[in-house]
Image (cartoon, rainbow, N blue to C red):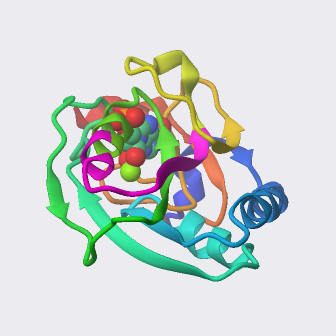
Amino acid sequence: MKEMKDDLLKVLLSEEEIKERVAQLGARISADYAGRELLMISVLKGSVAFMADLMRAITIPVSIDFMAVSSYGKGVKTSGVVKIIKDLDQPLEGKDLLIVEDILDSGKTLGYLIDTLGQRGPSSVRIATLLDKPDRREVNIRPDYSGFVVPDEFVVGYGLDYAEKYRNLPFVGVLKPEIYTVAE
Ligand code: IMP
Ligand code: MG
């Protein structure tokens, strides 16, 4: 039987490490936003696992919403073109937004989201990302809350995919390069 872990070079972040870090971020966010109207915006689909765990690590009341933007498709490199596929269900005036992402890579996706959502009159816009790959940055963005800095390797699991697979791994691993070089 073929298992997902057979396609991995190694485990980069274990379930335990992720859990501990998410708890720390949740505590910080709870303190930073005390008394404010926090709206957590999950960028589908990569951030679902992080969103689900992070929101439960936050102890103040929050609202949540979901947004989908175009991504890499099947490949591993960004096209740089970002398109809204599913928009938010509510107005943003006066709200404190926390955009929740799986990984900050070139920064194009988050750069676009900050601009677009910023034009809708929120009180503030911040970013929480599980992973940060600073080596690959093309747009000058720094996350306000970051789980882990990762090297320039293609990673999957805990929401992150390659060709829509591996999202259900409970940890983050490095994909064997032959998996995506053969396919492309
Ligand atoms: P950016 O616009 O280049 O910052 O791309 C961000 C998006 O690309 C993320 O939300 C991911 O969906 C995807 N991405 C970037 N690097 C990886 C990776 O190593 N594994 C899986 N997805 C990735
Ligand atoms: Mg994503």
Q: Quadrant of ligand 1?
A: top left
> Where residue 162 sits in the image (x, y, percent)?
37, 49
Camera-side residue of 157 and 46? 46
> In screen coordinates, is 57 left or right of 72?
right
Q: Is residue 128 magenta?
A: yes
Give the residue drawn at x 60%, y 42%: 131
Per the rendered image, the range of residues in magenta is: 115-131
Q: Is residue 101 magenta?
A: no
> Where residue 177 sits in the image (x, y, percent)?
46, 30
Identify whether 112 is placed above or below 69. above
Q: Is residue 109 visible?
A: yes
Give the residue drawn at x 58%, y 64%: 50
Camera-side residue of 111 and 138? 111
Give the residue drawn at x 21%, y 46%: 73
Residue 144: image quadrant is: top right
Give the residue drawn at x 50%, y 43%: 103
> In screen coordinates, is 180 left or right of 87?
right
Residue 138: image quadrant is: top left
> Where residue 94 sits in the image (x, y, percent)?
42, 65
Placement of the C terminus among the 4 image quadrants: top left
Report the number of numbered marks: 0
> Where residue 153 sits in the image (x, y, percent)?
54, 28
Q: Is residue 48 visible?
A: no
Identify whether 179 is placed above or below 129. above
